[in-house]
Amino acid sequence: MSGSAIPGTTPAPAASAETAPERRAERGAWWRGAAIYQVYLRSFADGNGDGIGDLAGLRARLPYLAELGADAIWLNPWYPSPMADGGYDVADYRDIDPVFGTLAEAEKLIEEAHSLGIRTIIDIVPNHGSVEQEWFVRALAAGPGSPERERFWFRDGRGDLPPNDWRSIFGGPAWTRVPDGQWYLHLFDPGQPDFNWDDPEVAAEFHDVLRFWLARGVDGIRIDSAALIVKDFDSPTGADGDLDGVHEIYRGWRRITDSYEGRILIGEVWLPDQERFARYLRPDEMHTAFNFDFLGRAWDPRELRASIELTLATHVPIGAPPTWVLSNHDVPRPVTRYGRQVTSFSHADRRDGVPSDPVLGERRARAAALLALALPGSAYVYQGEELGLPEVDDIPGELRQDPIWTRSGHTVPGRDGCRVPLPWSGQEPPFGFGTGKPWLPQPASWKDLTAEAQAADPGSMLSLYRQALRIRRAELGDGVLRWLEAGEDVLAFTRESGLTCVVNLGPDPVRLPPHGAVLLASGPLDGDRLPADTAVWLRTG
Ligand code: GLC
Ligand code: CA
């Protein structure tokens, strides 16, 4: 492949252009091509000096997000919570945790974001609540056989053994025993008891919660662990998720969402089987779902091309827009991930401890950003991705808060390394995050990665994201792509506007198409050649 040319603009077969008829009305809808910025509130910006990010901090930084080019923000759970799992253990679905602020502040945030053209997406957790949630407290008190226990999965054990052998996704058994001898199910932490969706009260409660937030102006709902909520106790695989009953539940959610204008449902659906995945995106179910297949692929031309083709083949026939995700609060940061020489990556297999080359990782993460942001559909940017933050791997054990760390017997570090508070400005911690000591320590080396330092540097990751999002808003987003013939180490495609994206994933430079003007490049070009691990956006049309 050395020095091979990319022969101009010979079109390969198009990915298809037809939109399913039921979906025609959605054409041009904001969410089909949105760039959505994920806010991990606890680590975004601290407004009151207690070292924990909050709504005041976020509201003060909304102009940063407007300047970055975010069309929407998605906030991880902000509800009252004992924080057994970073707030994914919800104690009250209709309020805000005091550490983050108040309901009135949340309403102000939604309004202020709207005035800057930014929509707000919140996170709803239907699979489980919290041990401090009123329903669970009442179920414990009411005892075995009570209707209160029917809202959860309480069962008798097998002697001293749990009711069955289901395992928690965070490690250890999925059952915890209560003082009267019964056990309750928790697919995650014991602090997160699973709801029983066979009980009609559970469905009714969540319908009401949806209305509560939609009436307050939220534009979208991210549905946590969406495929897991229905269980079959009598089947050994009955907790593996994706049981057929889930779809009727989300149809009900869709009817509610559709009764407000322009609101959407986004599924967190981790399913390797694309045919099963696509069922969640039927026209009367969710609007979109995160693309974890793309996120899980190694920096390899065959892997990434296969993922893009699979994604398009899954979404195009049903007319749902694909999504492109490079990171979130559950996975190692891209700069670190792509700096590792590994073939693939999955939710369960984090590759922690595998050495990573930071220079290579950054190069690839920059190129990956231009790839992901040029693809048709909506795109997610997880806070700090736009700053090129690496995974922090030296957090002292006693400061780690992810339950994965404790439940794995301190063998799996967990997800704290991608949740470290953002560096905003200055030369030393807390880097403008707030005035107090941040809840997780920030590396001293982040002085070069602050938003302030990067805003002043046209070659920074932040500048790259700002420019890419600006161009994207003007001419990318929803639509189709046309592959261009290129070498096997190169991904090249053109979008409707005539913008061509070329990514070199091979070891050697390749020649660029002759008639393109460079709009944006992830790294320096070598004359008319695109170096290894570099991406470029060209104007060819
Ligand atoms: C989702 C969330 C993750 C959380 C889990 C349990 O996967 O993204 O952070 O731990 O659900 O709620
Ligand atoms: Ca705070």
Image: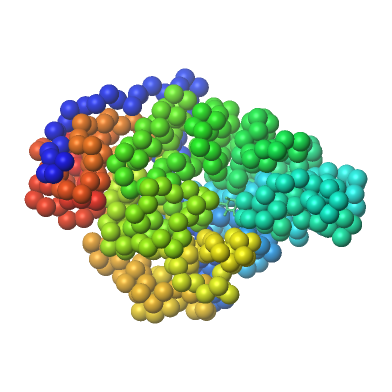
Chosen colour scheme: rainbow
Q: Quadrant of residue 453?
A: bottom left
Vertically, is 265 above or below 106? above
Q: Is residue 540 left or right of residue 43?
A: left
Q: Position of residue 473 (x, y in %)?
A: 34, 44
Q: In which image quadrant can residue 427 be found?
A: bottom left
Q: Is residue 36 left or right of residue 193?
A: left
Q: Is residue 62 above or below residue 201?
A: below
Q: How many marks?
A: 0
Which is more toward the observer, 116 or 265?
265
Q: Is residue 281 visible from the viewing direction of this image?
A: no
Q: Nearer the viewer, residue 43 or 47?
A: 43
Front position in the image: 161 or 138: 161
User: Can residue 509 be spotted in the picture?
Assistant: yes
From the viewer's perspective, is residue 279 above or below residue 112? above
* Residue positioned most to the top: 21
Q: Residue at x 72, y 35 (%)?
A: 235
Q: Position of residue 294 (x, y in %)?
A: 41, 42
Report the residue at 27% width, 30% height from top.
Answer: 482
Residue at horizontal 43 percent and vertical 78 percent from the top: 429
Which quadrant does the C terminus fall into?
Answer: top left
Q: Position of residue 224 (x, y in %)?
A: 60, 47
Q: Nearer the viewer, residue 499 or 410?
A: 410
- What is the x, y in percent for residue 366? 29, 54
Q: Quadrant of the N terminus?
A: top left
For this view, does 50 lie left or right of residue 487? right
The residue at the point 76 percent across, 60 percent down is 132
